[in-house]
Image (tube, coloured by chain):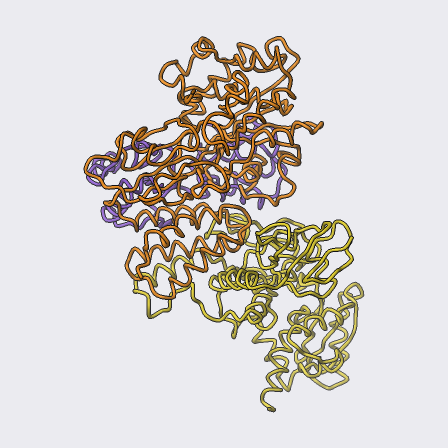
Chain colours: A yellow, B purple, C orange
Amino acid sequence: MEIKINNKKYKVEEGETVLDVCRREDIRIPTLCSFEGLPREAVCRLCLVEINLTDKLVTSCTLKVCEKLEVTTESEKIEKARRINLELLWADHAGKCATCKKNRMCELQSLAEEYKIENFHFVPRKDEMTVREELALVKENWSRVVVENENLCISRNSEFCVECRRCINICTEKKFSFNHRAGDVVVGTPYDQKLECSFCGECVRACPVAALTDQNNFGKIIQDLDDLKKIAVAIVDAGMEEKILEQLAKIGNKDKIDGLFAKLGFEKVIVLSEKDLRDEMIENFKADFARKEKINFNDIAVFFISSEIKLKAKKDKGLDYVLSEREVARLARDKISQKVKSKS
Amino acid sequence: MSTVEKILLEFEPETRNLLPVLKRISAAFGYVSQKDAQKAAKYFDLPLSRVYETVSFYDLINIKKQPELTIEVCSGTNCAVNGSFEIIREIENLFHVKAGDENNPRIKLEIISCLGQCGEGPVVVVNGKVYTKVTVSGVHGILKEWV
Amino acid sequence: MENKIITKYWNKIDPLNIQDYIKVGGYDALKKFIRDMDARTALEEIKKSGLCGRGGAGFPTGQKMEMVAEKTEKKYFICNLDESEPGTYKDSSIVDNNPHMLLEGIIVSALIVGAGKAFIYLNGHYEKQKEILAHALEQAREKEFLGKGIIGSCYDLDIEIFQGAGAYVCGEETALINSMEGNRGEPKLRPPYPTDSGLCGKPTCVNNAETIASVPWIIVNGGEAYSKIGASCSPGTKLYILGGAVKKPGVVEAPTGTTIHKLIHEFGGGISCGKELWFAQIGGASGRLITENELDTPLTFSRDCPVPLGSGAVLIVDKSVNIYDLILSWTGFFRRESCGKCVPCREGTFRLHEIAGRLKDGEISERDKEALEDILWTLNNTTFCPLGKFAATAMSDAVEKLGILGD
């Protein structure tokens, strides 16, 4: 079958959606709620396109291709729809990008940049509000925010949430729910209970913003990496290289994996799969290493670089830190780009 | 006194009975507690998250214990043109509460959607009892019955 | 010409007594269907009648029934009695005054589409109506109008009442089905349409109670007779719910295509004493506003009609009404009732209500006015389900026709 997209003909398979075709053919369509392998929810309304079969805007993520279909992916109307809906989301978002864990790795932020969303015209400026209104606004906004740092693996902050439902759909243990109604909607756990799960980390991987992030003590990590007395050892889990490079691409970092760890302040890099990680291994390695390099045992910090963020909670096998590919990218973002800046 | 178990056993564990069950539990105990939701989830073989999504969605199912006094004022179009917002302001001033405030443990004033009794508006519901053709002056007398 | 179909026996028969309804010809349609017709011929009559959905969308009923009737698998029929549109209580009035007419309509309709099981999705607040319906169902079963082998035929049908739990959006048929399946009452992605995959994945025909209540008359008197009543684009009678500043508020039945002027003066007894008409709102909180010079517009379900009939609620707003309170009523309603699923509706209704609050406090800024325009546009054009459009309608008209933002 053939369909037309932006006046150009494309061969398509029956059952494909317009978004699938556009992704394959490198035609840009912004999305926020869709995610690889998950059901198409069509709730972010950013992938709207115009077609020849109706006057209405339709979501390309759910629109199946059919004979004689003609699609327009860029028009004034589409631009307007995307801009307003992004701006509505942006207005409800915490908007503290500079200090955000996901700064420059956030899908909402990059969409906001792409569509030049800068003014908060849905939210009154501070000086335009009476004290009463301001209090009401703060109260209303905060009464719905859920922050949880109770576990050692996943940090939750609904202030950043864009209600895309990716975490709900990706969680095989069905821990998350779409709660309440209308403007009160919170994506969270039932009865706001603490998150208790196997901490597979899939939800963190899927979250487009900083609502679900890797739990860590970032200040202490940076301190240990920068401490000249301390030796930082990175043990890199199998298959991590590709994942890390993918994350680095988001922040525009073009480092090779070998050079990267040195730049981040690691003195030694070892590649070792998680399944080969034995109980005594790290302790023995530390002792050997300390003897060989004539340093204090406690001055060796071992970082396990792995997507298995559930290991963060275990604190066993002598590992000092467990860092995911996202956290490595975050380190690169904060440490390497800073150096570049100070040079220029 | 019915227990959650008793209510559950009245229904087959099919998902189409979930909403009626939750409504019944909420009506019997004032709200659906986490414990009760968990029991329902187990009975229907559903994750708790799925049950809570439903619990938190509907007006007639409460997720927490309700205050002693709950006043609901209809703000549907017909009630609104007949002065329901003036009644809301009157009650706000009378009890020093704000409509929609969920944090007052003693009293809750809620603006609700149409109950379909528009011919008799404005409609005020106090602890489940429906009052019709309520006026700003008349609301004092109604609330005296309850405090 | 017959102008009363649904309300014909209101206040004349005892709604709790099936015998009263039978005496005035009740259940004749069912008898006729069973003795002289089959699903196909009855469906032809419905199609010929031009009957269209009375819930507001105005979709041709015959066409919808046909889509389900032609399926061979197990299927369901649902009577939509969620009726949550503000200012609308016509369906509950049908139950209050003549529940058997509704039941007869459900039975005939369900048999037409070939469903063995029908549900009445009842508004969560309608406790009294639940009792009436349960009582009426009991009586109908006794008379063998329901159950196995309806009045000696080979037709079987069971009707069950399913009560909602308070959510406006459940009036939308896919949300209604979600709610019956124990889910959040969120609209589902369409296609698949309920007529293909509805309740439990089975083909399902969902019709508004008022639509269904018109079916017995059509079966008895023929589709052609019905098609001659009212406006030709959407024939029949309609229940109008008059409210606000009219002398005789309440539910009245009049042909489609009746003008608002006629509704106010002939059916509503005119504007209340000492009041002066400002505008009328047609179809509840999601309805359009009609100013004085448009009162002669006939109300129909046609897409070309400038004033969609919607639920049939006609609210007469007089000049003493505080418009800002009414705006808060609209925006507050959608701020509460949006399901929260899609971005424009969840965030848009929330911001719209904020702006309405500032409008009332007289603190609306220039930026608010721009924001308002954007929000109304996105609600109108980009939401997941029609609720977004509904949320924008009245406010758009208030800006355009009432000039609430000033110059």
In the image: residue C358, left or right of residue A62: left
Residue shown at 42% from the left, 44% from the top: C286
> Looking at the figure, which quarter contains the N terminus of chain B?
top left
* Residue placed most toward the observer, C400 or A165: C400
Of the 4 image quadrants, the one containing the C terminus of chain B is top left
Looking at this view, name the residue that lies furthest to the bottom.
A343
Can residue A49 be seen here? The reply is: yes
Residue B45 spot, x, y in % from top left? 63, 38
Residue A43 vertical position relative to residue A288 in the rendered view, above or below: above
The reply to whether residue B107 is visible in this rendering is no
Quarter occupied by residue C90: top left
Seen from the viewer's position, the closer of residues A84 and B21 is: A84
Above/below status of C72 relative to B144: above
Between B8 and C324, the residue placed more toward the observer is C324
Residue farthest along the right direction in this orientation: A276
Q: What is the number of callouts on the image?
A: 0
Q: Position of residue A303 (x, y in %)?
A: 69, 73
Q: Quadrant of residue A60?
A: bottom right
Question: In the image, residue A58 lies at what x, y percent?
Answer: 60, 53
Residue C331: give x, y in percent of width and height: 39, 50
- Depth check, front residue: A28 or C75: A28
